Image: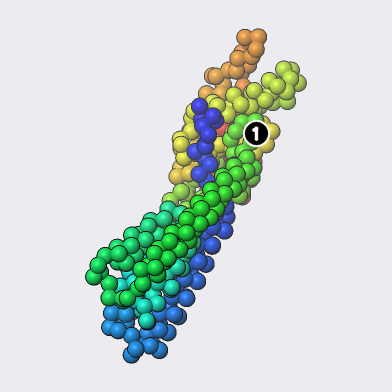
């Protein structure tokens, strides 16, 4: 049943952009810090010491600098930000391998490589961070323990201490990043659930007025070229006070839920039904002009009239509603379209109820 799915189709319209903004900012700041630091350090080393370095070391530093610049361009000039992060970590991984191979100045390269696991986890998260850290360890182990693989002269104790220290850093980086990600996911889930609850009518489990103003209308406005023209159908149960007074508020609540279920059967997956008042509902129909929307409203009116609600004693309660229809042509017409649909709804009431007014 539509209402009993864990996440309704209309939930996708709820604005949750601010939920994970903190995590995105953290990764972006980490990346910016790494790019800035890498450019300053690598460029400085080349400018100051290029004459003292070997050709291999100069090539390694220049190659690392190029990777850093390329990753920055991808990250800031294209929509593929994750690709920029991966290019940065890949480039620095190759750079680290070349440093291990050449040894740097006086074979001190190993002391400058402990940053890599911390950086890769911070920039890319636990999944990619683990991948790059594993590659880092495999490359380092191969180069350090394969005879003739490197030109640098490291002591055996220095090699083993470097690998063990790197493994400890990777272990604690993974634990920290993994559980931080778990905590963030849990908080994000709770925050999104709260947003859904705040945008959901408790009785009918359909969107409320807050959803329209905070999420759906901004969504329509942002995608006006694709979704407009759109139509609005405002409907109100006729003589609802009489139902409450005659049968009680419990039956009145069931009548509201009954109307919601009948209305939904006449709508498409892209249409949104909202409860905007006690017995008043608004149907938002994107990509549809007012003539077709008027036919939808008439279809709903007939379905409600022809689908009575069964009471506990087996008796049938026929529910009728009045309808007002309006059209949204441009993105600045949302409020005026709601007002017009509401006015036409009350015009339908004045004309005798149980009818559709669209002009």
Q: Can residue 19 be seen in this view?
A: yes
Q: Quadrant of the C terminus?
A: top right
In the displayed structure image, the side of residue 101 where residue 203 appears, left or right: right
Measured as percent of width and height from the top left, residue 5 is found at 51, 32
Residue plotted at (47% across, 59% down) = 168
Question: Which sits in the foreground, 199 or 141?
Answer: 141
- Quadrant of res 96: bottom left
In the displayed structure image, the side of residue 17 where residue 41 appears, left or right: left
Residue plotted at (40% across, 84% down) = 45
Q: Is mark 1 on a helix, strand or loop?
A: loop
Question: Which sits in the foreground, 295 or 29?
Answer: 29
- The residue indicated by pointer 1 is 202
Residue plotted at (53% across, 48% down) = 182
| Furthest-right residue in this view | 245
- Quadrant of res 233: top right
Question: Which sits in the foreground, 61 or 147?
Answer: 147
Measured as percent of width and height from the top left, residue 332 is found at 56, 55
């Amino acid at each position: 049943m539509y209402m009993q799915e864990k996440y309704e189709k209309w939930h996708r319209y709820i604005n949750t952009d601010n939920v994970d903004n903190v995590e995105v900012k953290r990764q972006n700041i980490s990346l910016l810090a790494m790019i800035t630091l890498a450019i300053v350090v690598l460029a400085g080393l080349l400018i100051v010491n290029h004459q003292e370095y070997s050709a291999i070391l100069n090539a390694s530093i220049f190659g690392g600098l190029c990777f850093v610049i390329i990753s920055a361009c991808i990250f800031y000039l294209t929509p593929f930000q994750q690709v920029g992060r991966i290019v940065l970590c890949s480039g620095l991984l190759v750079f680290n391998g070349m440093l291990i191979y050449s040894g740097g100045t006086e074979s001190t390269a190993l002391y400058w490589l402990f940053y890599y696991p911390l950086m890769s986890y911070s920039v890319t998260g636990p999944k990619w961070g683990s991948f790059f850290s594993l590659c880092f360890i495999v490359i380092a182990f191969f180069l350090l323990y394969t005879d003739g693989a490197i030109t640098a002269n490291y002591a055996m104790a220095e090699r083993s201490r470097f690998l063990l220290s790197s493994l400890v850093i990777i272990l604690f980086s993974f634990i920290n990043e993994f559980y931080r990600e778990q905590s963030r996911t849990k908080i994000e889930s709770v925050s999104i659930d709260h947003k859904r609850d705040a945008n959901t009518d408790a009785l009918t489990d359909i969107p409320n007025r807050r959803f329209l103003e905070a999420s759906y209308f901004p969504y329509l406005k942002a995608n006006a070229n694709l979704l407009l023209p759109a139509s609005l159908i405002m409907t109100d149960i006729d003589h609802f006070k009489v139902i409450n007074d005659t049968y009680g508020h419990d039956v009145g609540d069931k009548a509201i839920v009954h109307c919601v279920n009948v209305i939904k059967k006449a709508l498409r997956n892209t249409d949104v039904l909202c409860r905007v008042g006690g017995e008043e509902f608004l149907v938002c129909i994107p990509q549809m002009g007012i003539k077709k929307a008027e036919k939808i409203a008439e279809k709903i009116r007939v379905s409600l009239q022809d689908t009575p609600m069964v009471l506990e004693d087996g008796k049938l309660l026929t529910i009728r509603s009045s309808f007002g229809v309006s059209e949204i042509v441009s993105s600045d017409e949302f409020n005026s379209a709601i007002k017009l649909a509401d006015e036409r709804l009350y015009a339908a009431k004045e004309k005798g109820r149980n009818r559709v007014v669209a002009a």
